[in-house]
Image (tube, rainbow, N blue to C red):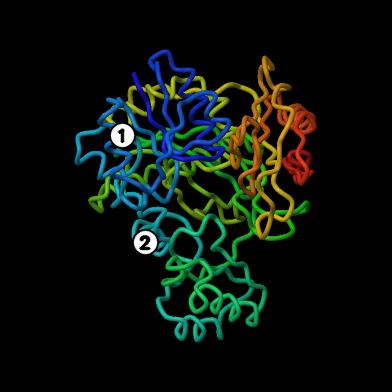
């Protein structure tokens, strides 16, 4: 079969890698793709938000399955466009992708269906938000309602910071229209864990757990980024926690969406906080996390195409989802200055070191091919992933592999997975 992947980051490279292992697949296309993905797929110069062009391409090339990796096209309704044209596509419809597209919607859904989450209020004007903050307990969390590349969340320690945050999100519109509505939420403490899942509208099958590092600098300092690294599984996500979440969070979320007339087919990413009062939902995403996909997918034993087709056909209950009994760590190699200001177009060397090395992966996030040379083309450049028998071994392997790659303004955190030592 022929498969089209929509997106251009490390997540899409990890998806392309998994798709390439399926015996069912003879040809992979990726739009728009990147330099690394081009080794597995034919990259097509169509943007992820050009729905009609993508659908036309899929129809002309007789694509059997399109996999949408990114949040923007899903929230924008790409699945609806494809389905209207009779094209087979993996991902939630627009009315289900709102689970990620609107934090206000997802918070209201959790409240209505008694899914554990932080106490909150939604605001659509700055004046009301500021009045509410006058009597609020600090620290407190401000969230832009819409998509903001993982950066629309501010943790405010006092009233002055919170007022500045309202100015930034709602008045200065730092995150654009994502800040038209804002969620003000209680600050939760505990371990963060990510759990990805496959969903077919009624059945949910969770993948192995993961934990990511959002801050730019060591010691969880600096600005929030799209993710500087991740590890899987999380040693803090126990069997007891899993059983609680299956009963009170995972299945209830799928049932709630169905009850609302928004059946969800695709990937639900559960961002959890393991609090003293039990696990609570921090956020939902309607697609694979990035860089979480880079540690979860290499550990999946199943044929990804079989699983995705089961989701589309409502037959996920027939799939026995299995993962390797090992661990993986991903360290993101970024451009110095990310996430604020950084140079692009810098030559990268050392890719040959990954050839023929089992259990080591170099997933491209922000790269492009320029005159036969792979160069940097983004803030997060590469995801260096390695597997190991356990987390400590995987971490050691991943950091060794980061030394195989060179580029002039290479930057990374040196404490990815350090929490493993505390487990």
Percent coordinates x, y for residue 365 in the rendering = 59, 40
Name the quarter where the C terminus is drawn: top right
| Marks 2/1: CA–CA distance | 33 Å
Q: Residue at x 58, y 75 (%)?
A: 165
Q: In the visual, does 288 lie left or right of 324?
A: left
- Residue positioned 76% across, 31% down in the render: 392
Number of on-image labels: 2
Q: Secondary structure at mark 1?
A: helix
Which of the numbered marks, if any, corresponds to residue 57?
1
State the image coordinates of residue 312 (x, y, percent, origin top left). 29, 32
Residue situated in front as seen by the camera: 143 or 83: 83
Looking at the image, residue 73 sits to the left or right of residue 263; the answer is: right
Secondary element type, mark 2? helix
Spot occupied by residue 387 in the image (x, y as percentages of width and height)? 67, 25
Identify the residue at image location x=46%, y=40%: 7
Mark 1 residue crowding within 10 angstroms, few (<14) / some (14–19) / many (20+): some
Q: Going by the image, does 230 lie left or right of 104?
A: right
Q: Is residue 362 above or below residue 368?
A: above
Q: Is residue 254 above or below residue 304?
A: below
Q: Which residue lies at the image location 72% right of the left edge and 60% below the top edge?
A: 222
Comes first in the chain, label 2 or label 1: 1
User: Callout 2: 10 Å neighbours few (<14), some, many (20+)?
Assistant: some
Residue identifier under label 2: 105
Q: Quadrant of the N terminus?
A: top left
Q: Quadrant of residue 108?
A: bottom left
Which image quarter: residue 223?
bottom right
């Amino acid at each position: 079969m022929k498969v089209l992947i929509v997106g251009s980051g490390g997540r899409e490279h990890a998806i392309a890698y998994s798709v390439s292992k399926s015996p069912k697949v003879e040809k992979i296309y990726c739009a728009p793709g990147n330099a690394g993905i081009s080794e597995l797929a034919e990259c097509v110069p169509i943007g992820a938000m050009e729905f009609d062009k993508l659908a036309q391409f899929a129809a002309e090339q007789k694509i059997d399955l399109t996999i949408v990796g990114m949040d923007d096209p899903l929230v924008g309704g790409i699945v609806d466009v494809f389905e209207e044209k009779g094209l087979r596509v993996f991902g939630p419809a627009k009315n289900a992708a709102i689970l990620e597209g609107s934090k206000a919607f997802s918070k209201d859904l959790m409240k209505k269906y008694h899914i554990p989450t932080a106490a909150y209020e939604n605001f659509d004007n700055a004046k009301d938000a500021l009045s509410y903050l006058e009597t609020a307990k600090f620290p407190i969390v401000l969230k832009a309602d819409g998509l903001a590349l993982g950066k629309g969340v501010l943790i405010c320690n006092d009233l002055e910071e919170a007022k500045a945050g309202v100015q930034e999100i709602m008045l200065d519109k730092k995150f654009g229209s994502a800040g038209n509505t804002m969620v003000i939420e209680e600050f939760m403490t505990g371990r963060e864990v990510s759990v990805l899942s496959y969903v077919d509208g009624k059945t949910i099958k969770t993948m192995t757990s993961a934990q990511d590092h959002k801050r730019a600098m060591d010691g969880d300092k600096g600005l929030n980024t799209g993710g500087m690294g991740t590890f899987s599984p999380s040693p803090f996500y126990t069997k007891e926690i899993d059983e609680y979440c299956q009963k009170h969070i995972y299945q209830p979320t799928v049932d709630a969406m169905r009850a609302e007339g928004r059946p969800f087919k695709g990937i639900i990413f559960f961002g959890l906080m393991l609090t003293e009062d039990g696990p609570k939902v921090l956020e939902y995403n309607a697609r694979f996390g990035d860089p979480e996909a880079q540690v979860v997918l290499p550990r999946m034993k199943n044929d990804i195409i079989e699983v995705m087709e089961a989701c589309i056909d409502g037959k996920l209950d027939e799939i026995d989802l299995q993962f390797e009994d090992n661990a993986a760590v991903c360290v993101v190699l970024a451009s110095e200055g990310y996430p604020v200001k950084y140079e692009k177009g810098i030559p990268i060397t050392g890719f040959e070191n990954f050839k023929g090395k089992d259990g080591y992966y170099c997933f491209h996030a922000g790269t492009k091919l320029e005159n036969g040379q792979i160069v940097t083309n983004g803030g997060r450049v590469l995801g260096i992933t390695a597997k190991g028998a356990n987390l400590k071994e995987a971490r050691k392997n991943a950091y060794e592999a980061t030394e195989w790659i060179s580029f002039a303004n290479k930057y990374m955190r040196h404490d990815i997975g350090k929490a493993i030592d505390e487990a």
